Amino acid sequence: MRKLIASFILFFALFLPFTMVASPAFAQEDAVTATPEDTYDYSTYDYGYDDTYDDSYSSYSYDLSDVDAEAGVFAGMAALLFSGVMLVFSIVIGLGSYIYCALALMKIAKRLDYENPWFAWIPILNLVLMFQLGGQNPVLLLLLLIPGVGAVVVGVLSIIALMKICEKRGYDKMLGLLSLIPVANYILLGILAWGKKEPVAA
């Protein structure tokens, strides 16, 4: 047994120094003797597709001029159609508003026993009618010839005239201030024209 242990010790004592010296030498020899043939060139591997660039794709272009022209024509037609619809709508609303106001003013004039109720249908004369019904001098309408300020003064006088018409029709004169509110002014004319109250005797 002692001889076996002694032989193992002798073996490791001789073999370990040899491996410590020989291993770096073998590694250097492998590094020096390695040839380019031992390395694998992955660039030569065939992946199954053609990676060459085709110049024909770069020369291809899309012709969008027809699309742009059609889009421009469509946008123009849409804008024209929209403006046409808005024009017709404005004409209908404006004409309806004028007819309603003329009917209401004529009815008011008849209920107040005005001698020329047909003035309500004629531009300018309808303002004369309203001023006369409201106790204002129609000559003041000439202030409309003064730019800016004249229109403001005539507007104030029209409100005062409507307030006096409200009094003549038996309503509170403050009701005439509804003429300052959009849509409410049409309601005011309807009340003055077709309201159930009878005119107040002067």
Image (cartoon, rainbow, N blue to C red):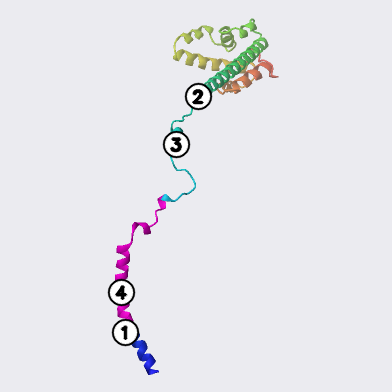
First reached walking from the N terminus: tag 2 or tag 4: 4
Q: Eyeballing the image, is 68 above or below 116? A: below
State the image coordinates of residue 184 (x, y, percent, origin top left).
60, 23
Q: Quadrant of the N terminus?
A: bottom left
Q: Residue 13, which numbered label? A: 1
Q: Residue 54, which numbered label? A: 3
Q: Eyeballing the image, is 190 above or below 117? A: below
Q: Residue 22, which numbered label? A: 4
Query: Marks 1 and 2, how far apart in space?
Result: 91 Å
Query: Marks 2 and 4, how far apart in space?
Result: 80 Å
Q: Are marks 4 and 3 in contact (CB under 8 Å)?
A: no
Q: Is residue 36 magenta?
A: yes
State the image coordinates of residue 199 (x, y, percent, origin top left).
67, 15
Give the SS element for disc 1: helix
Query: Marks 3 and 2, how far apart in space?
Result: 30 Å
Q: Are marks 1 and 4 in contact (CB under 8 Å)?
A: no
